[in-house]
Amino acid sequence: MNKKSILITGGAGFIGSHVVRRFVTNYPDYLIVNADALTYAGNLENLKDVTNEANYAFEHVDICDENAITAIFEKYNIDGVIHLAAESHVDRSISDPMSFVKTNLLGTTNLLHIAKKQWAGNFEGKKFYHISTDEVFGSLEMDKGFFTEETAYDPRSPYSASKAGSDHMVRAFYHTYHLPCVISNCSNNYGPNHFPEKLIPLMINNILHNKPLPVYGKGENVRDWLHVKDHARAIDLIFHEGVPGETYNIGGHNEWKNIDLVFLLCDLVDEKLSKPLGESRKLITYVTDRAGHDLRYAIDASKIERTLGWTPDYTFEQGLSETVDWYLSNESWLKNVTSGAYLHYYSAQYGK
Ligand code: NAD
Ligand code: TYD
């Protein structure tokens, strides 16, 4: 038996909820502590199927709060951290960069500082795993090259700059104090429970409500899409087998121009709802481009493939079709998050 107490930050968010579910289900001997501030992006409804499991605990906490995080380390005797909590939306970072600096940079540093203090130089069996993004590498030219683990950092949005800063701080704790840290940089995720301010769920939600589909600029920008469950599986593997001091790029070699992806989503929904093909495409509206919009992201995932044996399970065709099905059959989830009703889920669940 290998008992561990693992702190997962941001477990009520999109990717975090899939990671929490995977760990609670697959590792009954671990205690999984989900620490989340429940910002607009945190939704405990995402985890209603595991809330009552014996190896799951929830702590309503801001990762910037030194006393509260220290108390969690002491209460649960934390051995490992999987750090996902972040402000994650580029558009919000453009209008409110300070929230990104606070949570992504200061919050991450606070966690590192407390892990180092609590583990007091005895790092046997300990790990600090920081989840990051490929956006720290900047922007690629069309059809030219991929981000590798050696690509120089060149963040361009307040979001990616704050994540780059947090990655640097994680590396600094590894080199300076030998804190056993590992980092992964993943491409754009999609799948169930994705907050509908991001491209794929926003488009599905707007199609369902017959609202305009805002495509930034000419829709020529390229993103590399990976199913969230493939990311959660990679996180599991890296947490257990990733080498401290190393970083791993995660991606599915699945590049799409935004406009082609929006066409595909329109056609998928038309087909599933038996609407005339082409009906939803009429909702597409080209709008002013995002400021500083990165042209292209694309990941070279050969290191994680070669060293840890990870490759994606989902084809995009299957993953996207299942994702559309999920949104079609979970309209109440969509309604709750778009109306803000989900923000009351915590008090209903925990009576606070
Ligand atoms: P999300 O916005 O859906 O969820 C973020 C979670 O963090 C929410 O539950 C929120 O309540 C919580 N949180 C925010 N600020 C907090 C704070 N100060 N203290 C405690 N909790 C706080 O984000 P996501 O899309 O699930 O992304 C998770 C992580 O993965 C982030 O670190 C992000 O940078 C990284 N990432 C995301 C993608 C993607 O495509 N979504 C791709 C690569 C990497
Ligand atoms: P997004 O989902 O916000 O992820 P990121 O900016 O982190 O890659 O956006 C994905 C792409 O879709 C990005 O190029 C911006 C574009 N986009 C739109 O064209 N319209 C939208 O309404 C949104 C939210 C994004």
Image (cartoon, helix red, strand yellow):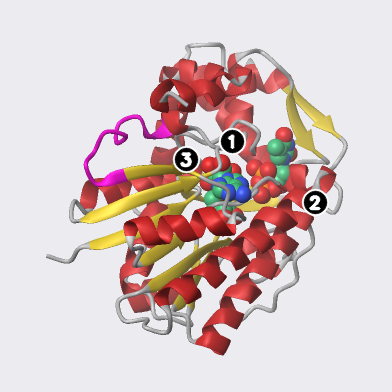
The three-letter code of the residue at mark 2 reads Pro
Element type at mark 1? helix
The answer as to whether callout 1 falls within 8 Å of ligand 2 is yes
The answer as to whether callout 3 falls within 8 Å of ligand 1 is yes
Which numbered marker is on residue 97?
Answer: 2
Residue that label 1 marks: 200
Q: Is residue 277 left or right of residue 55?
A: right
Q: Horizontal and vertical percent for residue 146?
A: 61, 70
Q: Nearer the viewer, residue 136 or 336?
A: 336
Q: CA distance from mark 1 to mark 2?
A: 24 Å
Image point (30%, 31%), residue name = 49
The answer as to whether callout 2 falls within 8 Å of ligand 1 is no
Q: Is residue 48 magenta?
A: yes
Dot 1 or dot 2, earlier in sequence:
2
Segment tinted magenta in the rendering: 46-56
Q: CA distance from mark 1 to mark 3?
A: 19 Å
Dot 1 or dot 3, earlier in sequence:
3
Marks 1,3: beta carbons within 8 A: no
- What crowding class fits label 3: few (fewer than 14 Cα within 10 Å), some (14-19), or many (20 or more)? many
Q: Nearer the viewer's eye, disc 1 or disc 3?
A: 3
The three-letter code of the residue at mark 1 reads Ile
Element type at mark 3? loop
- What crowding class fits label 1: few (fewer than 14 Cα within 10 Å), some (14-19), or many (20 or more)? many
The three-letter code of the residue at mark 3 reads Ala
Q: CA distance from mark 3 to mark 2?
A: 22 Å
